[in-house]
Image (cartoon, helix red, strand yellow):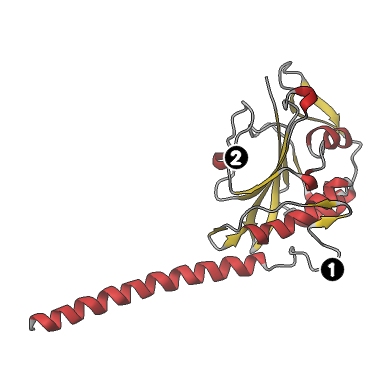
Amino acid sequence: MQLKEWHKVIIFLIAFSGSLVALRHWRQLSSTAAVISSELLPGDPSDSLSTGDTTMHQPPMIEVNGVDSQMVGRVAVRILNALSTADYPTLSKFVHKKRGLHLAPYAYIHDGQQVVDKETLLLGDTSVLRVWGSYDGSGDPIEVTFGKYHDRFVYDRDFRAADKVEFQTYSSYGNSLNNLRDYFKDSYHMSYYVNGTEEFGGMDWAQLKLVFDVIDGHLYLIALVHDQWTI
């Protein structure tokens, strides 16, 4: 075979290989995008980035494996609206029946924390006494009702009016170890950060992270991770 013909063969093989890679990438993006377009996405006209006098900030458009910040942000709007009124029956719609919802009072996530199942959330019973982990500083058990845990370690600020909203960004604002990336591998998350006040020198900041995973072909909320200044 002449040199020119070899050149043509090589160019064809390179182009063919590139096409295969592009096709695999397109299929991956299409598959994931279809997952996010499930019934978990808001379809109610009342779902909005504005709630009363509160306008939610949104992170820059970022795409990770076909999942973008706007897709996840639309689901997060509904979840924050439910959390703002402790509407756990509505929240249960976003939780997988087998995976449940992991609740972490501080940035460091571990197996000893509560994982609440979908049925419990659906019933909306916030009066049950549980141990949710240990208080920072004293090490005493966080033994409170679901309702009190919600007020202290889930929605202790209006996160719909967060000062900073981030998608897939592992920012650390305090001195707690942030192991979200390692504990929930291949997850997607939105972080809502509220500044502290001048009265306390900014130390009374708070952050809520909504962690998602793709399970059984749908996007589900798998964890609510609260963060604050720790000793």
Q: Secondary structure at mark 1?
A: loop
- Against 188, residue 217 (above or below) is below
Q: Which mark is residue 45?
A: 1
Give residue 97's position: percent from left, percent from top: 74, 54
Residues at circles 2 and 1 in contact by the CB criterion of under 8 Å: no
Quadrant including the C terminus: top right
Is any atom of residue 104 visible in this view?
Answer: no
Give residue 207's position: percent from left, percent from top: 71, 38
Q: Which mark is residue 123?
A: none
Quadrant including the N terminus: bottom left
What residue lies at 79% left-to-right and 46% top-to-bottom? 161
Residue situated furthest top in the rendering: 138
The front one of 151 and 69 is 69
Give residue 222's position: percent from left, percent from top: 69, 48
What residue lies at 77% left-to-right and 64% top-to-bottom? 42
Is any atom of residue 136 visible in this view?
Answer: yes
Label 1 neighbourhood size at 10 Å, few (<14), some (14-19), many (20+)?
few
The front one of 204 and 93 is 204
Amino acid at dot 2: Leu
